[in-house]
Image (cartoon, grey):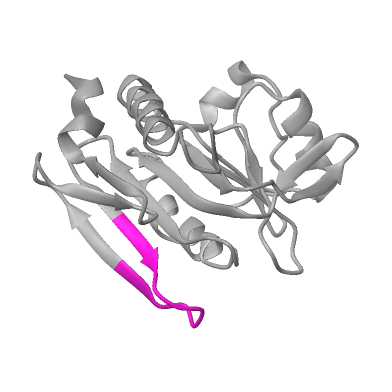
Amino acid sequence: MPDTAIKIPLTLEERLPYGEEFIVEADWDTFLNILEKGEYPVQYDEGKMLSFMGYGTEEHEALVGEIIRLLGNLLANQSYKVYGSNLALHLPGEGKKYYNADCSIIKGQPEKISIRGEMKAIANPIFLVEVLSKSTHNFDLGQKFQRYKTIPSLQQLLYIDSREQRVISYRKQDMKGTWLIEEFVDSEASVPVLEEGNLIVKDIYKALK
């Protein structure tokens, strides 16, 4: 549970004793200061700073690198831009929010929203990827998914499990908020991507071989 008495750590060494999940109440400016100067990843959702740190990072990072490469190759001749996890995402609504996906895709020109100074967030991702790990699994498929669904431009969400061979795809069907959910576990299964092509499950996971 969030605790306002906790001193928010700045360095990675100070952060580590709090374990895999660290949620603390913080105002927006305090969060932005940590974002600029801190040594660990943070996100923000309506008055709470969120930090998740897993320890099986080799598998996670290998999958992130592979999916970025595969998507970049698949969409190379189209008007898409593929980004890594440092891209800030703007979520609509009154409360302040700051999220990052493991991979983001934009079609055409990015719509940039000012955060502070030269810091900006992107408001028009069309495709997002999250690689699920032990520490982020419930949050990514729960609260974060609900936030992502509010992005008007978003057409597809892809979740890649780092602990087992499993890919979950959410594709928007209409403007009423209907999403098609598909799960792929077979090595030869074909995962559709934005109606531009497909990825094969075994190709996504070959980075772990």
Q: Is residue 17 left or right of residue 135?
A: right
- Residue at the farthest front position: 77
Q: Look at the picture and state if 23 lies above or below 202.
A: below
Q: Residue at x 76, y 69 (%)?
A: 94
Give percent across and percent down for residue 105. Answer: 52, 44
Q: Position of residue 98 (x, y in %)?
A: 67, 48
The verdict on residue 194 being magenta is no
Is 174 in front, or is 130? 174
What's the residue at 81%, 37% (across, down)? 119
Residue 87: image x %, image y %? 63, 37
Vertical position of residue 52 compared to residue 155: above or below = above
Q: Which x, y percent locates residue 208? A: 22, 22
Range of residues picked out in magenta? 169-180
Tell me the quarter of the picture where residue 136 sits.
top left
Out of 143 and 84, give the one closest to the viewer: 84
Q: Quadrant of residue 59?
A: top left
**The C terminus lies in quadrant:** top left
Which sits in the foreground, 106 or 42? 106
Work out which residue is located at the far bottom of the displayed protein and give it.
176
